[in-house]
Image (cartoon, rainbow, N blue to C red):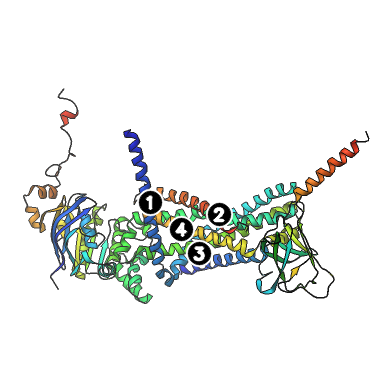
């Protein structure tokens, strides 16, 4: 009986703690938005963060995009061939990349490459009292450290997703057209007939912006909230990757339900 | 303008339910080096954070440079902090910037100066701590003592009237320790600032400070000039000054009687 | 200074991103082929539209000439009404007929326009009179099976 009560109490404490953290995270996010003015006036701060979040993620995004597209080309060809419609390979590759895989996989890679780096960096800045030092110099760390990272990463995310999709389509083209020998004209023209700019590409871009906001907000909060110890920072980094991956997939479901219901 | 830069009366501070500081009275004159000493976990860092405005007192009066800290909004606090410098325990240099940019940071954030003037000012501050030659190193290339001197240059960049030092001597070799101590003294005298040093390095402190407060278990246990403290017969001060193992601060953590615990009585 | 190379990299990054979006828009997508400005809308009713969806292509002689903009249901006639946006570059006679076709056996459905012989051309808001609904695969299979069993019973009789 006592054990049951204790475990119930434990669950309750966990729930309350979770809601509490949610509230703190929301307040932190709003603070970040409120304190963003300075980083736009001093745009070189954002440029720096675009470099570390975006440019440094380029290699992994481009290579992964190429390989994902090549696999899509191979697998798609195998399946479409059964129905004798291997000309639709371009449609399959481009739609799956532009609508889903581009934004989602790029965001997952971004979370593990840039998101974890942001958490570790901010967590370490906190652990080594750099944030406290900044505050003692009358500089708000949210305005000076958090907000530029937020905007740099949010700007980078759709660019990375678009590059991922473009690389993927190129990969699909390489395997499908160059290697297997699907008709090149059919590959591109069917693709162009099926892919709509507003419906598919723009919605994909919107998705990647939403994912970018989610991943970056999570990464920043986890870093800012991390216990100032080596263990705390490493756990926060892990949590960033796990939480933002789940957030990406959950948000993807919601967004897809809104965007492509096919009414 | 009063003679005391810092004026603390009956200050109490509770962290959650736990009373950390109870009824502290402390004052620091302009141009003095004041040390706050005590054993680890005795509340001296808390006191420093209260003076820096990172924490709010639960009750009591805390005046810094004529400003009442307990009723200060964010803007007021930030204005006051431009007149403060703080040296953190391990320097807290920004690891993604060079030494030069670290020292230039407060200048770039707060003073709208042309880049050449910033350059001159930074080199002046670095020269004052003897590290002008190290201006394009990264913090990871510095030794602990050098990092702290760079941090000190950064703390004095805006020419503050108050400098707070959190454990400036922790983890330093004897040479760096002496250098840092002399530097604190010299900067205080030449810049005319007030320095508050939180430390437990008694020998170095007694050599260079003007006045010492002992904080123990949330109260001021003793105070006085270095000479007064050296001569003090009060058991706590005596134990601290001479680094004795047992005394009012026991060697053993409270425990049941040794014999009972080993069941020797049976 | 060091900042200049950083700016260069970020510049390359942003330009690459813009190039990727342009590639997606122009090479992969159908950006700019039909905006609302250069289309006119005509209406057609079908007894059955099968799996036709909004944004399905409208083809004439195999060329995409427009897209389905809206699909509705007329509760008076119990028919499906389909709004079609046609490119103003392509003019069709008033008696043009529309039929719903399937590209390939299992492919997407589209509307095929067959030009008539009248001189007057279709204009905004016109109604296409002659339509042919979708062939529903299930009905087709049902008919086929029905015919086959009938045929079998016929061939079985003489034995």
Quadrant hosting residue A263: bottom right
Left or right relative to B16: residue C27: right
Q: Mark 1 and mark 2 in contact (Cβ < 8 Å)?
A: no
Q: How dense is the environment of label 1, judged by Cα within 10 Å: few (below 14), some, or many (20 and up)? A: few
Label 1 or label 4, whichever lies nearer to me, is 1
Label 2 or label 1, whichever lies nearer to me, is 1
Does the rendering let one see residue B180?
no
Q: Which mark is residue A155?
A: 3
Label 1 or label 3, whichever lies nearer to me, is 1
Question: Callout 1: helix, strand or loop?
Answer: helix
Question: Callout 3: helix, strand or loop?
Answer: helix
Q: Choose the circle earlier in sequence order: 3 or 4.
A: 3
Q: Mark 4 and mark 2 in contact (Cβ < 8 Å)?
A: no
Instruction: Measure how far apart labels 3 and 2 are at the Cα level.
Output: 16 Å
Question: Callout 4: helix, strand or loop?
Answer: helix
Is A37 drawn above or below residue C105 in the view shown?
below
**Residue most extreme to the top:** B266
Tell me residue A150's x, y (percent).
Answer: 44, 62
What is the chain identity of the residue bearing mark 3? A
Q: Residue at x 13, y 63 (%)?
A: B27
Q: Residue at x 65, y 57 (%)?
A: A94
Does the rendering let one see residue B256?
yes
Quadrant hosting residue B197: bottom left
Viewer-proximal residue among B22 and A9: A9
Tell me residue C31's x, y (percent).
Answer: 66, 67
What residue would you read off at disc 1? A19
What residue would you read off at disc 4? A216
Q: Which mark is residue A104?
A: 2
Q: Residue at x 24, y 52 (%)?
A: B16
């Amino acid at each position: 009986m006592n054990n049951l009560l204790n475990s119930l109490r434990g669950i309750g404490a966990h729930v309350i703690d979770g809601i509490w953290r949610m509230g703190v995270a929301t307040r932190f996010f709003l603070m970040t938005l409120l304190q963003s003015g300075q980083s736009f006036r001093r745009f070189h701060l954002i440029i720096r963060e675009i470099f570390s979040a975006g440019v440094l993620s380029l290699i992994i995004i481009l290579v992964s995009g190429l390989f994902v597209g090549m696999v899509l080309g191979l697998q798609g060809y195998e399946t479409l061939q059964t129905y004798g419609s291997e000309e639709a390979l371009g449609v399959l590759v481009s739609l799956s990349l532009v609508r889903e895989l581009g934004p989602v996989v790029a965001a997952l890679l971004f979370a593990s490459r840039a998101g974890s780096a942001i958490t570790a960096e901010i967590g370490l800045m906190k652990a080594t009292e750099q944030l406290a030092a900044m505050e003692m110099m009358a500089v708000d760390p949210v305005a000076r450290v958090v907000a530029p990272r937020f905007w740099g990463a949010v700007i980078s995310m759709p660019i990375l997703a678009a590059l991922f999709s473009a690389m993927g389509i190129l990969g699909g083209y390489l395997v499908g057209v160059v290697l297997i020998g699907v008709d090149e004209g059919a590959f591109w023209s069917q693709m162009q007939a099926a892919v709509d700019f507003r419906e598919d590409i723009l919605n994909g871009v919107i998705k990647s912006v939403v994912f970018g906001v989610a991943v970056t907000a999570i990464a920043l909060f986890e870093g800012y909230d991390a216990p100032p110890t080596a263990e705390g920072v490493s756990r926060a980094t892990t949590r960033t990757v796990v939480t933002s991956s789940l957030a990406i997939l959950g948000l993807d479901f919601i967004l897809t339900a809104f965007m492509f219901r096919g009414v | 303008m009063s003679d005391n830069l810092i004026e603390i009366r009956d200050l109490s501070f509770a962290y959650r339910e736990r009373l950390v500081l109870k009824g502290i009275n402390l004052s620091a004159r302009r141009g003095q080096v004041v040390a706050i000493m005590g054993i680890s976990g005795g509340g001296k860092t808390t006191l420093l954070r209260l003076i820096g405005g990172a924490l709010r007192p639960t009750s009591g009066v805390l005046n810094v440079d004529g400003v009442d800290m307990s009723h200060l909004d964010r803007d007021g606090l930030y204005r006051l902090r431009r007149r403060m410098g703080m040296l953190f325990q391990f320097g807290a240099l920004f690891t993604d910037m060079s030494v030069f940019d670290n020292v230039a940071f407060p200048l770039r954030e707060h003073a709208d100066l042309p880049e050449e003037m910033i350059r001159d000012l930074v080199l002046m501050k670095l020269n004052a701590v003897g590290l002008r030659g190290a201006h394009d190193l990264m913090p990871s290339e510095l030794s602990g003592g050098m990092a702290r001197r760079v941090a000190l240059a950064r703390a004095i960049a805006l020419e503050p009237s108050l400098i707070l030092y959190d454990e400036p001597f922790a983890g330093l070799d004897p040479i760096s320790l002496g250098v840092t101590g002399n530097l604190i003294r010299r900067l205080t005298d030449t810049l005319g600032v007030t320095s508050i040093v939180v430390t437990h390095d008694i020998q170095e402190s007694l050599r260079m400070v003007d006045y010492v407060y002992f904080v123990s278990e949330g109260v001021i246990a003793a105070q006085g000039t270095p000479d007064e403290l050296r001569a003090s017969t009060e058991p706590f001060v005596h134990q601290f000054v001479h680094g004795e193992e047992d005394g009012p601060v026991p060697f053993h953590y409270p425990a049941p009687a040794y014999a009972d615990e080993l069941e020797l009585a049976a | 200074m060091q900042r200049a190379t950083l700016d260069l990299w970020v510049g390359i990054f942003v330009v690459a991103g813009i190039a990727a979006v342009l590639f997606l828009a122009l090479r992969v997508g159908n950006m700019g082929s039909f905006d609302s400005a250069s289309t006119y809308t005509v209406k057609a009713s079908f007894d059955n539209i099968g799996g036709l969806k909004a944004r399905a292509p409208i083809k004439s002689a195999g060329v995409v000439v427009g897209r389905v903009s809206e699909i509705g249901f007329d509760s008076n006639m119990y028919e499906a009404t389909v709004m079609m946006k046609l490119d103003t570059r392509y003019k069709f006679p008033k008696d043009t007929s529309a039929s719903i076709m399937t590209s390939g056996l299992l492919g997407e459905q589209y509307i095929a326009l067959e030009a008539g012989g009248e001189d007057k051309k279709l204009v905004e808001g016109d109604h296409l009179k002659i339509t042919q609904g979708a062939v529903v695969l299930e009905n087709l299979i049902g008919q086929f099976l029905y015919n086959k069993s009938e045929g079998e019973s016929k061939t079985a009789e003489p034995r």
